[in-house]
């Protein structure tokens, strides 16, 4: 007869309770994450964690079979218990996969960053399926599958309690770390297969964003004219001090201000306050270098509906039509080429020239809609405001 000391292995116990805790937290998150970016990202992070822990648990179970059910359990009880366990394994793997497919087929292409650290790709075959019927089907299955999981959880707990307080030999103690010891434990095996297999699969998928994204083209070197909607300058008379200069963008997300900078850019400058008609500035910006202080934002800016850096590795800007303004500053027209879309915006700036050194500071207000940035998931500016302010400031040195 099976005794109460027949127990699961320590690894099986650890996986059981870790996954159980994550599932309970996921159920709570599912009811409390609407319009909450942090919880939504955490929901996805925990879902992927459950997926790979469950894969490890299935592999471990295959190489380390669990102890048999007590002999005094009725046949129908054993059948029901087995069915509940099979259902659990199907849902522990199936629900995270459905969730992954759900966010991949959504028209709202929000990047996934696991625990704010690891970029996680969308499924590769879903690009043409976003926002369609498949997404609705997957959303239904994911939602109803969660309810099935809750029902199975109730049956699982009820069965464990019933066998502890009933006449049958209890099974709950076999999964509690503090109760009992195995009669004749067999050496555990399959550590590398179970955990190594799950870890390798995770690492390969996590590396896909790095392997599949094209490296953005570097901005042209100083002195080489950049392609732009307007004719490029043929000469330069100022050299930008990159260490003391920046291109910054500022906007509003969910009512809160955010800011970031482009870390890679170059500029060719010809400017003479006595010959404004000839003044011309050519700028090349690497949009993949946008840093907004949060990996989720950085990944989103690189994605297809935002800057789409794999297709458009640079943003070209030509600043022309300079004029002096009454307040002592200057105005100009910034003619930009963003994702092959030409956009013209006014630019105002102040400039101070002291000998061979110039300091400058300027501002332009851009429209995401005009640039076709983030128009699939947020065309009305419900999340990210349509207006984005770009500021430039820094110093330059006159060339000999």
Image (spheres, helix red, strand yellow):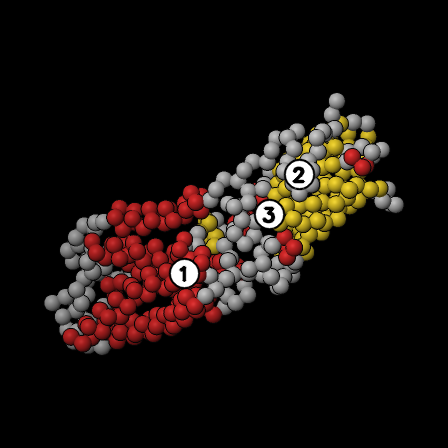
Pick whichever, 11 or 356, lies toward us. 356
> Residue 101 — which label?
1
**Badge 1, how many Cα within 10 Å: few under 14, some, many 20+?**
many
What is the number of callouts on the image? 3
194 over 230 or under it: above or below: below
For residue 383, which quarter of the picture? Answer: bottom right
Q: Residue at x 52, y 61 (%)?
A: 108
Q: Nearer the viewer, residue 386 or 59?
A: 386
Which circle's residue, 2 or 3, is located before the other in the chain? 2
Residue 245 rendering spot, x and y as whole percentages: 69, 37
Residue that mark 2 sits on: 283
Mark whose residue sits in front, 3 or 1: 3
Residue drawn at the location 74% of the way across and 36% of the way down: 280
- Could you tell me which secondary element the residue under label 3 belongs to? loop
Q: Nearer the viewer, mark 1 or mark 2?
A: 2
**Gap in Å between the C-alphas at discs 1 and 2?**
40 Å
361 sits left or right of 145 in the view: right
Asked whether residue 246 is in view, the answer is: no
> 312 or 354, which lies in front?
312
Q: Outermost residue, right direction? A: 326
Quote the CA–CA distance across marks 2 and 3.
Answer: 15 Å
What residue appears at the point 40 percent right and 69 percent down from the top-left corner? 137
Q: Which residue is mark 3?
A: 340
Label 2: few (<14), some or many (≥20) within 10 Å? many
**Distance of mark 3 from mark 1, alpha carbons?**
31 Å
Quadrant in which residue 136 is drawn: bottom left
């Amino acid at each position: 007869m099976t005794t109460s000391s027949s127990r699961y292995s320590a690894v099986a116990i650890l996986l059981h309770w870790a996954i159980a805790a994550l599932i309970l937290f996921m159920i709570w998150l599912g009811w409390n994450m609407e319009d909450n970016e942090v919880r939504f990202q955490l929901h996805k992070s925990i879902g992927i964690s459950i997926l790979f822990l469950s894969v490890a648990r299935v592999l471990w179970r295959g190489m380390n079979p669990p102890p048999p059910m007590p002999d005094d359990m009725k046949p129908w009880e054993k059948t029901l218990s087995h069915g509940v366990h099979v259902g659990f394994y199907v849902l522990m793997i199936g629900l995270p996969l459905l969730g992954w497919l759900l966010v991949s087929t959504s028209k709202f292409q929000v990047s996934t960053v696991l625990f704010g650290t690891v970029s996680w790709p969308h499924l590769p075959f879903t690009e043409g399926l976003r926002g369609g019927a498949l997404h609705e089907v997957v959303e239904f299955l994911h939602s109803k599958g969660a309810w099935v999981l809750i029902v199975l959880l109730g049956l699982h707990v009820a069965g464990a309690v019933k066998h502890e307080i009933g006449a049958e030999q209890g099974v709950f103690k076999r999964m509690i770390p503090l109760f009992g010891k195995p009669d004749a434990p067999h050496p555990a095996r399959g550590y590398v297969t179970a955990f190594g297999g799950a870890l390798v699969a995770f690492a390969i998928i996590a590396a896909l964003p790095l392997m599949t994204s094209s490296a953005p083209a570097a901005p042209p070197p100083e002195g080489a004219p950049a392609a732009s909607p307007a004719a490029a300058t043929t000469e330069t008379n100022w050299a930008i001090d990159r260490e003391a200069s920046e291109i910054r963008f500022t906007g509003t997300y969910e009512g809160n201000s955010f800011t970031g900078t482009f870390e890679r850019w170059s500029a060719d400058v010809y400017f003479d306050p006595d010959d404004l008609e000839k003044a011309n500035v050519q700028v090349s910006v690497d949009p993949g270098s946008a840093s907004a202080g949060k990996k989720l934002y950085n990944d989103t800016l690189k994605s297809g509906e935002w800057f789409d850096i794999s297709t458009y590795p640079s943003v070209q800007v030509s600043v022309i039509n300079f004029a002096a303004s009454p307040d002592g500053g200057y105005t100009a027209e910034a003619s930009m080429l963003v994702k092959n879309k030409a956009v013209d915006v006014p630019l105002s700036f102040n400039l101070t020239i002291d000998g061979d050194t110039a300091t400058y500071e300027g501002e332009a207000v851009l429209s995401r809609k005009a640039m076709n940035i983030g128009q699939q998931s947020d065309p009305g500016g419900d999340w990210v405001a349509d207006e984005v302010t770009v500021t430039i400031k820094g110093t330059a040195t006159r060339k000999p």
